[in-house]
Image (tube, helix red, strand yellow):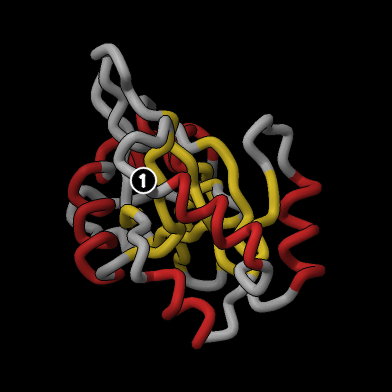
Amino acid sequence: MQPMYNPFIQFETMMTERLIRLNIIYLVTQSYSRADQTAQAGAKINILLTGYENLETARSHRVALKDKYAAIIQLNQPAHRSKLQSMLQKESPYRLWFALIKDKWVTEKQINYQFRDPLKRYINAKTNWRVGSDEQLRPQLVCIFGELYIHLKRGTKKLEIRLNDIENY
């Protein structure tokens, strides 16, 4: 089985101040299975952080999760910032990821290349779209509450597919 596609960046200490300057002070945490999984002893627990300006939106995300690592970190609270900093330490059992795609164009190109055939098989099996062999699909990767989806448009029709459903299709 091939590793899961991971478009997100690792969270770094210096990002905290930048997020505060951007008024993104609420971080929702959740377990993250797309990060590289290693069988070696001492492997880290991967956690995904998703940033929000609004507490209500962060709460909506948090409530939607069924995850023992689900929480809201408020960067404007010293105790929360301290906890985040401890999670970033080398000896911490965690490896933190941030729900941010560094280069959207490169990511979409990778998605189109890596998942072209599974996408076409999925479309042929699950829709009435007929995709020609020479037709170029233009998938867009979207993150909703920490879950990755592929959005496709074809004329007036739209399709939203969980990336998990495509990866081994």
* Residue at the image point whose x is 56% and y is 62% from the top: 81
Quadrant position of the N terminus in the picture: top left
**Quick check: can you spot residue 38?**
yes
Res. 156 image quadrant: bottom right
Local packing at callout 1 (Cα closer than 10 Å; few below 14, some 14-19, many 20+) is few
Q: Which percent across, then down, holds residue 63?
A: 80, 48
Can residue 159 be seen in the rendering of this structure? no
Q: Position of residue 19 (x, y in %)?
A: 49, 77
Which image quarter is the C terminus in? top left
Q: Which residue is mark 1?
A: 89
| Residue 96 image position (x, y, % from top left) | 41, 47
The secondary structure type at the circle numbered 1 is loop
Q: Nearer the viewer, residue 84 or 165?
A: 84
Instruction: Name the residue at 59% across, 84% down.
Output: 23
Residue 53 appears left or right of 1: right
Q: Is residue 1 left or right of residue 53?
A: left
What amino acid is labelled 1 in the image?
A: Gln
Instruction: Describe residue 116's horizontal placement relative to residue 17 as left or right.
Output: left
Q: How many marks?
A: 1
Query: Which residue occupies 63% across, 36% down?
Result: 69
What residue lies at 69% left-to-right and 47% top-to-bottom? Answer: 71
